[in-house]
Image (cartoon, rainbow, N blue to C red):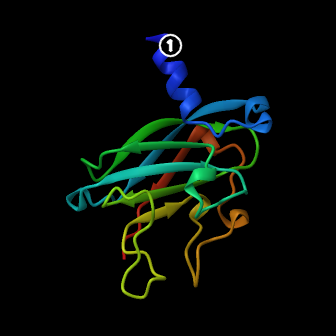
Amino acid sequence: MKLSRISLLIGSLLITPEVLSMEWHTITLTINQIEPQRGGEIVVYIFLKEGFPIKHGKALKKYPFDPHHITHTIEIEVPNVPFAIKAHHDEDRSGTVTKNWTRIIPAEGFSFSSGAKMNVGPPTFKDAMLDKPDNNKIHLPMIYP
């Protein structure tokens, strides 16, 4: 059991010397306003500045789960340095954000930490950045087109 947990932890990290030297702590993340009838999965990404929010492969960690309820609470690990969170309702499980007919506007649900919003494009890392969250709890509402 311990070996599989260690493998899962290592597999979920972008392994770099910077990541290996980071301290991590556990927080409670609640995502609400999920539309479970859309199917697919919700994927929560933990980012440093590099890659946020588009390059999912640059995320430090990712936490996928099936959207069975309107609200879902999970415990996640975040670094003790400024970070940002992106939650994506990946309805087709493609690993990318599906766009509508404009090829600009997302057709799937999403949410960002710190209340960061999409404007003409995605929010910046600075807009979504968090240090240590209050009471080790974060609430993210999913936004759907």
Amino acid type, label 1: Leu
Q: Is residue 11 above or below residue 85?
A: above
Place of residue 114 in the rendered image (x, y in percent of width and height, measured from the top left): 61, 60
At 61% from the left edge and 36% from the top edge, which residue is drawn?
13
Give the number of callouts: 1
Count residues near mark 1 (Cα–Cα under 10 Å), then give few for <14, some for 14-19, many for 20+: few
At 43% from the left edge and 75% from the top edge, which residue is drawn?
106
Is residue 16 left or right of 41 when viewed as pictured?
A: right
Q: Residue furthest left?
A: 37
Residue identified by numbered label 1: 3
Query: Which quadrant of the view contains residue 51?
Result: bottom right
Q: Is residue 2 above or below residue 119?
A: above
Place of residue 3 in the rendered image (x, y in percent of width and height, measured from the top left): 50, 13
Is residue 117 left or right of 48 when viewed as pictured?
A: left
At 69% from the left edge and 38% from the top edge, which residue is drawn?
79
As helix, strand or loop, the secondary structure at mark 1 comes to helix
At 42% from the left edge and 88% from the top edge, which residue is drawn?
102
Front residue of 103/115: it is: 103
Quarter of the image containing the N terminus?
Answer: top left
Is residue 111 left or right of 67 when viewed as pictured?
A: right
Place of residue 140 in the rendered image (x, y in percent of width and height, measured from the top left): 48, 56
Quarter of the image containing the C terminus?
Answer: bottom left
Query: Which quadrant of the view contains residue 78?
Result: top right
Q: Is residue 119 above or below residue 130?
A: below
Place of residue 127 in the rendered image (x, y in percent of width and height, measured from the top left): 68, 67
